Image (spheres, rainbow, N blue to C red):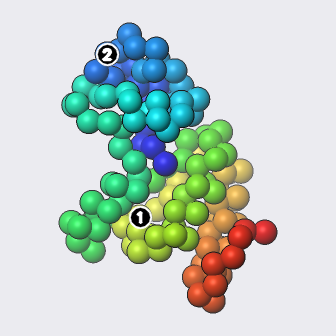
Amino acid sequence: IILAHDENFARLGMDPTSPLCNRTVRDLTFKELMSCPLKSGARPPLLFDVLRSAAAIGDHAKMIVEIKAGNTEAGPALARMFLRHPNLMDHVAVVMSFDAFIMHNFRREMAYVYEQLHTNQVLPPP
């Protein structure tokens, strides 16, 4: 999961005229995203890396994760990440979206995650 506030990296990209920086983030492949350097010289951040950094800071470090309206892929991806790395949930204060459909589906996905973690059996989602 890539962290991006804007729809593209035109504002943050090292080369704002680059075709990669001007394409919608959701339309880029992972390889393309990682080859789009930002003005800071870094690559676009991954939620996984940010949450691992929060874990390294300490138990008090918590993030607010917003799923942008219309991004139906992010909720299931986030739930899968939590299923694979349940310790990262400790560093998320809240997951939010202004899209009720996304939040409804995310709640269902997370119910499955909690069920699997509680039974210690990780099975494919229904």
Residue in front for this viewpoint, 107 or 75: 75
Would residue 12 be found to the left or right of residue 1 on screen? left
Q: Quadrant of residue 80?
A: bottom right
Q: Looking at the image, tell me whether mark 1 or mark 2 is earlier in sequence order.
A: 2
The quadrant of the rendering that contains the C terminus is bottom right
What residue is at 57 percent from the left and 82 percent from the top?
117
In x, y percent, where is residue 18? 40, 14
According to the picture, the residue beneath numbered tag 2 turns out to be: 15
Residue in front for this viewpoint, 30 or 96: 30
In x, y percent, where is residue 12? 32, 25
What residue is at 63 percent from the left and 89 percent from the top?
119
Residue 16 lies, with reference to residue 94, above or below; the image says: above
Q: Which element is circle 2 on? A: loop
Residue 36 lies, with reference to residue 83, above or below; the image says: above
What separation in Å lies between label 1 and label 2 (alpha carbons)?
Answer: 32 Å
According to the picture, the residue beneath numbered tag 1 turns out to be: 92
Would residue 119 be found to the left or right of residue 81 on screen? right
In x, y percent, where is residue 102? 66, 51
